């Protein structure tokens, strides 16, 4: 069964407007393009544009002045004590700083979900790097990094050595592009036989799987980092403003 994924149109618009604000193209205090201008530029329906603008307003990127329009506030301040987002932590994690055991480092056929996330044909060759993470001698996570073979070749990502830098640094150096944003997907399922053995869980256990798709400013995906977590040993937490 094929798996196809494309970020929703409103999410694509949010990412692009955030990029323009971050880059200074839309400086703080400047008026945002009108709904009609955005509809014409991005070929989107008004409800899609309104939804994206509502998210940007709620997150603190823009502000609405009645009768005058929408204006840029800038990148919202991160609340004190906010947890590092899961995807960002996975991209920046250094294997030498955690207790890991390398399970796989080599070329494989991309599963349908990973193919869809990377925007490549199903079963295309990709580089897979998979490790088992332990804490206090207890297995707590299976971490997998999926990326095009052309990006991984000639880098430490294809070798059987512990990574001294986070995945992001290797990918950006090899791709010659800065990773701009992450799209996260969280799913829940039962484990495979291999996961039962590696994580020491029963076949009826609930696993959380976090997929972090890292893209450049144009929206092109470069790498997917997957984290498989036993549900009884982890709790996902996030914090954000509710303006």
Image: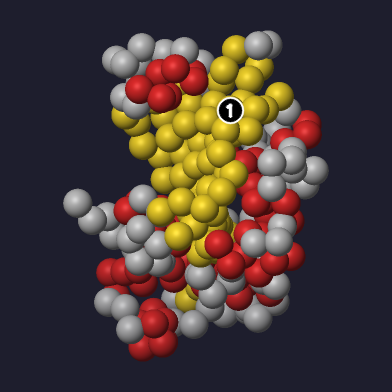
**Nearest to the observer: residue 165 or residue 30:** 165
**Nearest to the observer: residue 92 or residue 167:** 167
Can residue 85 be seen here?
no
Where on the picture, by quarter, is residue 141?
top right
- At a point 40% along the width and 62% down the height, the residue shown is 124
Where on the picture, by quarter, is residue 143?
top right
Q: Residue furthest left?
A: 1
The residue that disc 1 covers is 132
Relative to 125, does residue 184 appear above or below in the rendering?
Answer: above
- At a point 71% along the width and 24% down the height, the residue shown is 99
Residue 78 rendering spot, x and y as whole percentages: 67, 46
Residue 194 rendering spot, x and y as whole percentages: 41, 25
Residue 110 rendering spot, x and y as whole percentages: 40, 54
Residue 167 rendering spot, x and y as whole percentages: 67, 50
- At a point 36% along the width and 88% down the height, the residue shown is 40
**Nearest to the observer: residue 212 or residue 56:** 212
Can residue 100 be seen here?
yes
Q: Is residue 99 left or right of residue 128?
A: right
Give the SS element for disc 1. strand
- At a point 28% along the width and 69% down the height, the residue shown is 47
> What number of labels is visible?
1
Relative to 91, does residue 234 appear above or below in the rendering?
Answer: above
């Amino acid at each position: 069964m094929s798996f196809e994924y494309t970020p929703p149109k409103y999410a694509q618009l949010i990412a692009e407007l955030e990029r323009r604000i971050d880059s200074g193209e839309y400086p703080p205090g400047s008026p945002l393009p009108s709904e009609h201008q955005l509809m014409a530029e991005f070929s989107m329906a008004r409800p899609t544009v309104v939804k994206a603008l509502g998210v940007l307003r709620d997150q603190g990127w823009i502000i609405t002045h009645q009768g005058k329009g929408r204006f840029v506030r800038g990148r919202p301040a991160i609340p004190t004590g906010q947890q590092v987002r899961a995807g960002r932590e996975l991209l920046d994690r250094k294997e030498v700083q955690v207790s890991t055991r390398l399970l796989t480092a080599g070329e494989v056929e991309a599963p349908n979900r990973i193919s869809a996330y990377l925007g490549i044909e199903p079963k295309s060759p990709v580089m897979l790097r998979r490790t088992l993470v332990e804490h206090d001698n207890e297995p707590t996570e299976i971490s997998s990094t999926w990326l095009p073979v052309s990006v991984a070749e000639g880098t430490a990502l294809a070798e059987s050595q512990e990574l001294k830098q986070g995945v992001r640094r290797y990918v950006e150096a090899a791709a010659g592009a800065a990773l701009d944003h992450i799209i996260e997907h969280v799913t829940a399922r039962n484990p495979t036989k291999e996961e039962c053995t590696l994580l020491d869980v029963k076949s009826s256990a609930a696993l959380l799987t976090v997929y972090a798709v890292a893209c450049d400013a144009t929206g092109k995906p470069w790498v997917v980092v997957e984290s498989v977590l036993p549900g009884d040993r982890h709790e996902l937490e996030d914090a954000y403003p509710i303006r």
